Amino acid sequence: MKLRNSAIPLAWSSPFARWQGPLAEFGSLDLAVDVAARGLSAAGFDTGRVGGLVLGMTVPQHTSFYGAPTVAARLGLDAVTGPMIAQACATSAAVVQAAATQVESGAHEVMLAVATDRTSNGPLMIYPSGAGAGGAPVSEHWVLDPMRGDPSTGQSMLDTGENVAADEGYTREEIDEVALLRHEQYRAARAFRDRFLVEAHVPRRKGAVTVVAEDHGVHDTTAEGLAKLSPVTPGGVITYGSQTHPADGTAGMVVARAEVARELSGGKGVARLLSVAFARVERARMPKAPVPAARAALRDAGLDIAGIDVVTTHNPFAVNDLYFSRQTGFPLDRMNPYGSSLVYGHPQGPTGARAIAELIEALRARGGGRGLFTGCAAGDTAGAVVVEVGDSS
């Protein structure tokens, strides 16, 4: 989908916390409202300009039936409504597309796009089944069961990473090198994260508040430590050090008409949205999907990979980035220059939105340029977004 008149003047993310960590008892809708309100206020953004809201969320939460209108009302936007979107780990790209479509069509000048998820304490779904013995219900753990098996293939998320590694002949050493690079990039970027991270304030008993200001649960990874880990699958090449972990978090952005975005940017470089695209690959080969999604988005933007300055990815496995680099020729060290979800975790819906916020700030830091976000999703799919920052910060 080619975009002609949409831009992002403001994007933010909460810190991400490893599941069952400091955000485990904070519902994802509560987290989204808390962080979005703080991020918008800190930027001096006039919420009265917002015409619509798109909410991305993949894990049901208490009262989430009411979705976007509830989030809007709690942010003081009583006249604002919009849809709730779920597309597994490509949810953020779908949210960007939905918000930009409203802007491109002229329905609204300014849209609020928010994604949020809590993998901690995931709901147990009970489905009535009259065909079961004695009418016994069928149950599904909403977070854990999808990781264990795609209903189209019967294979797990991890299987898809091992399948691609076997297809391409990747060695354990090559995969560990990519994982170590991502951790080194992340460790070197502490000050950079201040550009877009917004604290989460988690209420506790008797008025106390826990402030989550940094990512929680990131391991101090070394080459020696990675080498000592056993493969998750016997005989495989992926370890717990070269794959991501489930997490809790939220992220969001303002999407507006380009000329309005310049007005709202507060002097920062505006990120023009050039395109959004999605793709699907052969079954049980999920880490391959970001490549055709990226190529489709680049084609719609009238670009090729040579015209891209920075790439950020959602990479649940180091295999993803290795495959992308070898298929496109884009250098591994120019991808995810400040870290990635491989390091700080994956709350599903908001993971891509954080990577887009990082991409925009990386382009602003270098004085402008073109950037690509691409990331895989369940069902061997992926979403991709191309942006251009024309002004320095």
Image (spheres, grey):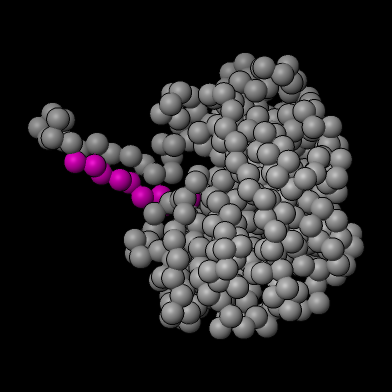
Q: Tell me the magenta residue range.
A: 119-128
> Which quadrant holds the C terminus?
bottom right
Which secondary structure is most common in the magenta stretch?
loop
Q: Position of residue 385 (x, y in %)?
A: 68, 49
Q: Residue furthest right?
A: 367
Q: Which image quadrant for residue 259?
A: bottom right
Q: Residue at point 70% right, 59% down?
A: 4
Q: Is residue 199 left or right of residue 222?
A: left
Q: Residue at point 44% right, 58% down?
A: 84
Indicate whether 271 appears above or below 183: below
Q: Which image quadrant for residue 179?
A: top right
Q: Residue at point 86% right, 60% down?
A: 368
Q: Position of residue 65 (x, y in %)?
A: 34, 61
Q: Residue at point 72% right, 50% down?
A: 386
Tell me if residue 127 is in the magenta stretch: yes
Q: Is residue 301 visible?
A: yes
**Observer-nearest residue: 47 or 4?**
4
Q: Residue furthest left?
A: 134
**Observer-nearest residue: 83 or 139?**
83
Q: Position of residue 50 (x, y in %)?
A: 56, 76
